[in-house]
Image (cartoon, helix red, strand yellow):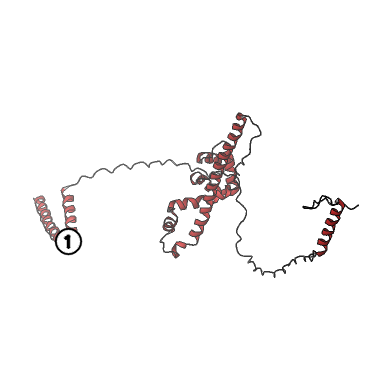
Amino acid sequence: MKKQPPPVPVIGASQDSSREDELRAWEEKQRHRQQTTQVPEPVAAPQVVVPAPAAPVAVPAVDASAPVAAVSEPSGYLAMPEFVEPASSDPADRLEHYSRGILAAQYAARANHERAEQQKLIALGLRLQAIKDEELHKHTGFETFGALTDARFGIKKHQANNILRVLGVAQALEDVTTQELKERPLRVLVPVLDTHGADAVRETWAEAARHGNVTDTALSEAANFLGYAPPKVQSVLEVEPPKAKPAPAVPVDESGRVLERLRVLAAQDLAAARREAEALQAAVRELVEELAGNLDR
């Protein structure tokens, strides 16, 4: 059944007009309006332009011999604890929760600092070793390797040499500890590395770490315990040879003093010494003849 539109009152109509006539007139008017109104043409759907596939980009060939930069993050670092709201609403529990997070953040910061200092020692050592091996100071106007490191990096010659001395030890310990590796304690392990290798260095470190803080003394004792320390050379007591008894003094007579005086004079004036010696010889001859005459009487 067709739904009838609501009645529309006609303003100014006579009160005697019937309601049916009014409705019929209104319907006719609506029908005429619909017929005279043009129906809009359907709008065509917009065309979607699909872009053509791009031409393949030529990828340059990769040189297999070229060094490839490492993309992996260095291991051994601790992630900072994430902030998490405590589950409890009790103030004491919430404070305890936040306190544990603060202590964990401080611990991670200390551990990461020590690991960074360890990696710094190795990174400096590798590059200083390369500069020294390639003698780059000769090609950059510096007289010595130490002069270059001091001028360019603020590293004195003895500091650079100390880093190079313990570089192998630091590399051997890189995978067994994240602790900061200082140059002085590592000196103890240099002869261990040279004689017994990297495994002995790691074993010595682990033995020293069992007893607490790793110091040069602890490393030395661990190396001795494991038999990796170089043998100590016992100092040999020097026995003093018996002192030779001085030869008895020979009494110096007058003739000896005269001869010694002539030798000193000869070193200064040979001609004068010869004249004096000849005169002395003549005097001695006369004395001998005189003594001989006296004996004949």
Please indicate, yes or no, whether residue 208 appears anywhere in the rendered image: no
Residue shown at the point (45%, 65%) measured from the top left: 139
Q: Residues within 10 Å of mark 1 (few under 14, many from 20)?
A: some
x and y, in percent, of residue 175 in the image: 60, 47
Please tell me in which quadrant of the rendered image residue 150 appears: bottom left
Q: Is residue 57 left or right of residue 160?
A: right
> Which amino acid type is shown beneath numbered disc 1?
Leu
On the image, numbered disc 1 is attached to which residue? 270
Give the quarter of the image for residue 67. Answer: bottom right
From the top left corner, tell me how far across and down residue 235 is, in percent. Answer: 45, 42
Nearest the viewer among 45 and 51 is 45
- The spot of residue 280 in percent (x, y) is 12, 56
- Residue found 56% across the figure and 46% down from its top: 115
Residue at image point 55% right, 49% down: 119
Up-down relation of residue 18 to residue 234 (above or below): below
- Residue placed most toward the observer, 155 or 87: 87
**Residue placed farthest to the right in the image?**
1
